Structure formats: structure tokens, C-alpha cells
């Protein structure tokens, strides 16, 4: 994120090919990003992985994974207005995959 003057105020995500689910694998991931109605950030990767981050960039977990064919590809992700469903555009498969948004764990603050 940058402020209006172009100063970097925040970033998140790490690149890794070790299989760490908090990191982005491959040469060109994430391929797409979308904000959810509650302010979380969803990322879509060319291998079909959808991840959720808090608005502050904290990894919240994988939303799901779509089985795709072929190599590196452009992908798109969207979320329903009620935050219950995630839509993943599978261009090579000529389909939109609908995933149920997993329940977000709420930390006990007491």
C-alpha cells in the first residue's frame, strides 16, 4: 500500500517454493487480488489456490483450491456481497468454480 504521496505504508506476502501455505509459490503469484465485504483480502494463484489475508496482511488460511489443467495461467477471484461464496474463474476449463467461504476463526479476547 502507498499513501497519496507515493510513500510505501505497508506490504505483505512472501515468495517461496517450499510449499509453505503462507507464501506465494511459482514465478508470478499472486495472479489476482480481491477485497471482501468485511475488509479481508483474497489472493488467487495460477495453480488454483485461493488464500485469505486480514486487511493488515496477516495470513488467515487457504480458502480452497481448484483443480486446474496446464501451466501458469491468468486467474480471477471474486466474492459474493454476503461474503459466503468465492468465485474462481477457471479460464482453461471454461467454467466458474463456486466455493463456500470457510468460517473465519475468531480469537478469544478474554
Image: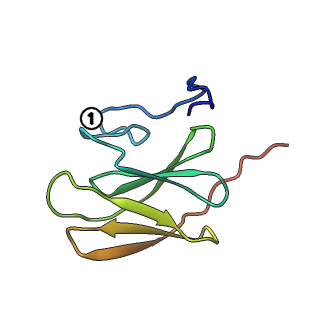
Q: Quadrant of the N terminus?
A: top right
Provide the secondary structure element on which disc 1 rests.
loop
- Residue at the far right in the pictured view: 110
> Within the image, what quadrant is residue 66 found in?
bottom left
Going 35% across and 75% down the picture, which residue do you hit? 96
104 sits to left or right of 108: left
- Give the crowd class for mark 1: few <14, some 14-19, many >=20 residues within 10 Å: few
Q: Nearer the viewer, residue 104 or 97?
A: 97
> Within the image, what quadrant is residue 93 found in?
bottom left
Going 56% across and 71% down the picture, which residue do you hit? 80
Q: Quadrant of the C terminus?
A: top right
Q: Position of residue 9 (x, y in %)?
A: 60, 26
- Residue at the far top in the pictured view: 7
- Identify whether 3 is placed above or below 81: above
Q: Position of residue 41 (x, y in %)?
A: 55, 50
Q: Position of residue 64 (x, y in %)?
A: 42, 60
Going 39% across and 37% down the picture, which residue do you hit? 23
**Pointer 1 residue:** 17
- Residue at the far left in the pictured view: 70
56 sits to left or right of 15: right
Going 45% across and 34% down the picture, which residue do you hit? 13
- Identify whether 2 is placed above or below 101: above
Q: Nearer the viewer, residue 109 or 36?
A: 36
Amino acid at each position: 500500500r502507498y499513501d497519496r504521496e507515493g510513500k510505501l505504508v505497508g506490504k505483505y506476502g512472501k515468495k517461496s517454493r517450499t510449499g509453505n501455505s503462507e507464501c506465494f509459490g511459482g514465478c508470478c503469484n499472486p495472479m489476482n487480488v480481491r477485497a471482501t465485504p468485511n475488509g479481508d483480502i483474497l489472493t488467487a494463484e495460477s495453480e488454483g489456490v485461493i488464500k485469505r489475508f486480514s486487511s493488515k496482511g496477516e495470513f488467515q488460511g487457504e480458502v480452497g483450491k481448484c483443480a486446474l489443467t496446464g501451466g501458469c495461467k491468468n486467474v480471477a477471484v471474486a466474492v459474493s456481497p454476503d461474503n459466503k461464496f468465492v468465485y474462481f474463474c477457471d479460464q482453461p476449463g471454461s467454467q466458474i468454480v463456486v466455493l463456500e467461504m470457510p468460517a473465519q476463526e475468531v480469537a478469544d479476547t478474554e
